Image (cartoon, grey):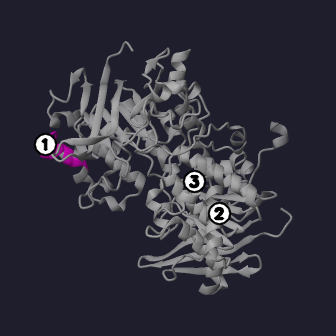
């Protein structure tokens, strides 16, 4: 950790007001992101995994200031961005790639207009340079000049995602939030897009926050991985370390739930069954939020919330089982 | 596997007539399903795996769909020759289907109990009380807690995983011989997906129902199925036992699919292999083998002729010129 972090998130909270009382004051909250802290070093990838509704996308959008954080600090290059930076300047540094490639492209704009729009907004290219710059961006993501005058519907899902990546790269950002960029794509196309993201990271020294529910793909692309459950980070470690020695019971269960594409390995795979569903984030269990589904639940779990603590070599976990050791 | 096949699909071809021309969504495919076995159909979107499943249930709207050729033999009867009234007796009774999205497959204004009971009253001629009791029993079987109370609830009161359990309960309530599961776990979270796969595996053993699992998730297929069919562009690329497909794949498309997946149990960083290009547009499919524009081993014959069936071992067949008996082979005795 001698390197300085490009992005540091400290005690980030995002509560959505779900109900107000007679005077319009908030009466109940949905705690989508509740006290989340992590940092990402320059040129590295942090994977953020969890089941739907655990707050992983909200975390990404709050960092990008698409949602105003309820509390907490987001430090980018060591500066607090909620106050100091104006939004337009921030967008030049941080961009996002969305899950549904087709829904995130304007169907009435041609590819060159889509990729060129960020250049116009930020006045990054003169009229003469514009076309050349767009072509360079398209070539960077594996498209070419003949695609420039086409419309999004003329492309396959994988190509649409490439257009989304080219648009995000137009402003030369240093940080990209990839919100489930491959889950809408076919298996053979997923690998193409992941390899593209890895190549661009090497070439342009990009830093990624990679949000996904596909744990195998997250392991492949990430340097560090954070596991979220109901708005909290329950475990955070280097990718190989997390998959080799998971500490939190939720992480263990999550990893054991993934079917392996190999019938012989499947027979040997030990599943840790999780009973029931994820509780509603409107009314999470008291104490440890995982206590209602945890196979090792103790009395203390429903009373006291475990804190995220370092258990050595940058491996963080929040569980009472670990504190006992 | 000595018994007669439960379901036998023979040279099935399904076309769709569109304004842009004819699309052969399923092209001359043949396979058998034996009683009590689980077979998996894998492939990318648009490869015809769902059309195959829907054809078995006769759920393809005609027009624009058209069964151009082939037979679907269920026992001795050809399902393609059946009238709509006859099919209605088979659907839900002998063959059931569960879909990807359980919310849109359930009727939002009827209680769960009424929906499960409906097929029992219709097919098994049960009275209301018996159907209700059987529905409670089915809900208990699929692992829904306190079924006596939940049976009076509506679909929106259930979570995604619970709704899929209700769908399975409904599909299995009449003890069908064949269950078709069309991407049953795609919309669900990982832990819930594992629960549903375990449930299907468990019920397959208990009730001896044959299952056709359609999925693009090779992991799900590996955990449930004993035989696997790999489809590409409406054709069968390769078919064999799960061990054949995952350990001795012979078609370059199967190689590519397996190599492009990162594995959770591999601890060193791998570079993902990719299949270049895009799946073909079925309006103007490539000549010869449909995979040749993306195949790293394509030869000139691949562009001209579709490869005939090559049977490698019992039950393992592949459509690829590389595996043709006349293709050059390494001398295995020398290399070994």
Q: Which residue is mark 2?
A: B236
Q: CA distance from mark 2 to mark 3?
A: 44 Å
For this rendering, which residue is in front, B269 or B129?
B129
Indicate which label's residue lies in the foreground, 3 or 1: 3
Q: Residue furthest top?
A: A2
Label 2: which secondary element: strand
Q: Is residue A269 above or below residue A242?
A: below
- Residue A127 on the magenta span: yes
**Tag 3 subunit:** B
- Which mark, residue A126? 1
For this rendering, which residue is in front, B282 or A315?
A315
For the residues beneath circles 1 and 2, the answer to whether they share a chain is: no
Residue B306 visible in rendering: no
Quarter holding the C terminus of chain B is top right
Prevalent SS, magenta region: helix
Quarter holding the N terminus of chain B is bottom right
Label 3: which secondary element: loop
In the picture, measured across the screen, residue B184 lies left or right of residue B108, that is right
Say how many tags the image has.
3
Q: CA distance from mark 1 to mark 2?
A: 53 Å
Residue drawn 56% across and 62% down?
B167
Q: Callout 3: few (<14), some (14-19), or many (20+) C-alpha neighbours within 10 Å?
A: few
Q: Which residue is mark 3?
A: B146
Q: Which residues are magenta?
A: A115-129
Answer with the quarter of the image where residue B300 lies: bottom right
């Amino acid at each position: 950790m001698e390197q300085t972090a490009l992005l540091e998130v400290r005690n980030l909270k995002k509560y959505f007001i779900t109900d107000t009382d007679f005077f319009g004051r908030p009466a109940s909250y949905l705690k989508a992101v509740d006290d989340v802290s992590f940092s990402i070093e320059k040129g590295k990838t942090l994977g953020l995994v969890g089941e739907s509704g655990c707050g992983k996308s909200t975390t990404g959008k709050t960092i990008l200031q698409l949602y105003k954080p309820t509390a907490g600090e987001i430090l980018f290059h060591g500066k607090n961005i909620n106050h100091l930076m104006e939004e337009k300047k921030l967008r030049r540094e941080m961009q996002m790639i969305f899950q549904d490639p087709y829904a995130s492209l304007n169907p009435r704009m041609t590819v060159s207009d889509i990729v060129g729009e960020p250049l116009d907004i930020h006045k990054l290219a003169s009229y003469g340079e514009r076309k050349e710059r767009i072509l360079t961006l398209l070539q960077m993501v594996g498209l070419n000049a003949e695609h420039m005058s086409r419309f999004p519907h003329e492309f396959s899902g994988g190509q649409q995602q490439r257009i989304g990546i080219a648009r995000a790269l137009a402003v030369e950002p240093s940080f990209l939030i990839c919100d489930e960029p491959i889950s809408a794509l076919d298996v053979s196309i997923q690998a193409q897009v992941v390899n593209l993201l890895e190549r661009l990271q090497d070439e342009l020294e990009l830093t990624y926050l990679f949000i996904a529910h596909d744990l195998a793909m997250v392991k492949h692309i990430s340097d560090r991985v954070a596991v979220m459950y109901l708005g909290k980070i329950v475990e955070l470690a280097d990718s190989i370390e997390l998959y080799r020695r998971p500490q939190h019971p939720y992480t263990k269960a999550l990893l054991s739930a993934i079917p392996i594409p190999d019938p012989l390995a499947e027979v040997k795979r030990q599943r840790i069954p999780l009973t029931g569903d994820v509780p509603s984030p409107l009314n999470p269990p008291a104490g440890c939020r995982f206590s209602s589904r945890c196979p090792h639940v103790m009395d203390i779990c429903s009373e006291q919330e475990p804190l995220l603590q370092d258990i050595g070599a940058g491996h963080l976990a929040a569980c009472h089982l670990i504190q006992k050791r | 596997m000595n018994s007669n096949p439960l379901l036998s699909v023979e040279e099935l071809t399904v076309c769709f007539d569109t304004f842009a021309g004819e699309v052969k969504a399923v092209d001359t495919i043949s396979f058998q399903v034996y009683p009590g076995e689980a077979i998996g159909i894998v492939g990318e979107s648009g490869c015809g795996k769902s059309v195959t499943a829907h054809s078995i249930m006769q759920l393809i709207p005609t027009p624009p769909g058209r069964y151009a050729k082939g037979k679907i033999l269920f026992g001795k009867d050809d399902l393609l020759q059946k009238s709509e009234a006859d099919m209605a007796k088979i659907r839900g009774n002998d063959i059931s289907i569960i879909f990807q999205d359980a919310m849109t497959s359930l009727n939002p204004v009827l209680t769960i109990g009424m929906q499960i009971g409906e097929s029992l009253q219709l097919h098994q001629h049960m009275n209301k009380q018996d159907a209700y009791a059987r529905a409670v029993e089915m809900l208990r079987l699929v692992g829904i807690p306190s079924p006596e109370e939940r049976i009076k609830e509506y679909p929106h009161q259930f979570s995604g995983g619970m709704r899929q359990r209700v769908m399975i309960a409904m599909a299995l309530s009449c003890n069908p011989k064949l269950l078709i599961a069309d991407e049953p776990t795609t919309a669900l979270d990982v832990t819930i997906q594992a629960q549903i796969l375990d449930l299907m595996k468990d019920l397959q053993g208990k009730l001896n129902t044959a299952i056709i699992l359609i999925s693009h998730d090779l992991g799900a297929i590996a955990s449930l199925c004993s035989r696997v069919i790999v489809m590409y562009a409406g054709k069968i690329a390769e078919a064999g036992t799960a061990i054949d497909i995952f350990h001795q794949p012979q078609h370059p498309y199967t190689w590519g699919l397996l190599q492009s997946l990162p594995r959770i149990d591999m601890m060193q960083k791998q570079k993902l292999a990719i299949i270049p290009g895009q799946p073909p547009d079925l309006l103007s499919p490539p000549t010869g083998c449909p995979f040749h524009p993306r195949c790293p081993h394509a030869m000139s014959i691949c562009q001209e002729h579709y490869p005939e069936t090559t049977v490698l071992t019992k039950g393992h067949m592949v459509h690829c010129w590389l595996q043709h008996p006349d293709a050059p082979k390494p001398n295995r005795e020398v290399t070994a």
